[in-house]
């Protein structure tokens, strides 16, 4: 088993990790612009249905890609 490196010692350069979002249906990578467009569409659909959109979706729709 490999030992963990001490991050403070400078042994290994740290690279910020990026979150990768994938489609639940196809498994393909979804871009941030696609996520924002889907959130905006969800808000419109929820308004038509007369239901309240979840806050995290509203916040996502406010972003710019």
Image (cartoon, rainbow, N blue to C red):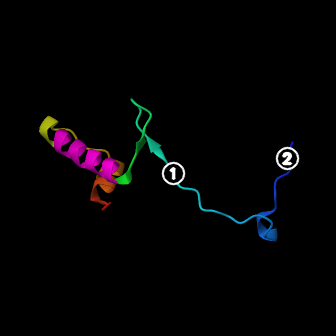
Q: Count the labels in the image.
A: 2
Q: Name the quadrant containing residue 27.
A: top left
Query: Which element carries disc 2, helix, strand or loop?
Result: loop
Residue 44 is a magenta residue: yes
Image point 38% across, 50% down: which residue? 31
Which residue matches tag 1? 19
3D distance between C-alphas at marks 2 and 1: 25 Å
**52 up-or-down from 58: above or below:** above
> Which image quadrant: the C terminus?
bottom left
Sooner in the amino-acid sequence: mark 2 or mark 1? 2
Which is the main secondary structure of the residues drawn in magenta?
Answer: helix
Residue at the far front in the pictured view? 28
Residue drawn at point x = 36 percent, y = 50 percent: 56
Q: Position of residue 29 (x, y in %)?
A: 43, 42
Residue underneath mark 2: 2
Residue at image location 40% in from the left, 36% down from the top: 23
The region drawn magenta spans 33-46
């Amino acid at each position: 088993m490999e030992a963990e490196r001490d991050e403070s010692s400078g042994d290994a350069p740290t690279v910020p990790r990026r979150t990768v979002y994938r489609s639940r249906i196809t498994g393909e990578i979804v871009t941030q612009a696609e996520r924002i467009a889907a959130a905006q569409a969800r808000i419109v659909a929820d308004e038509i249905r007369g239901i309240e959109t979840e806050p995290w979706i509203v916040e996502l729709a406010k972003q710019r890609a």
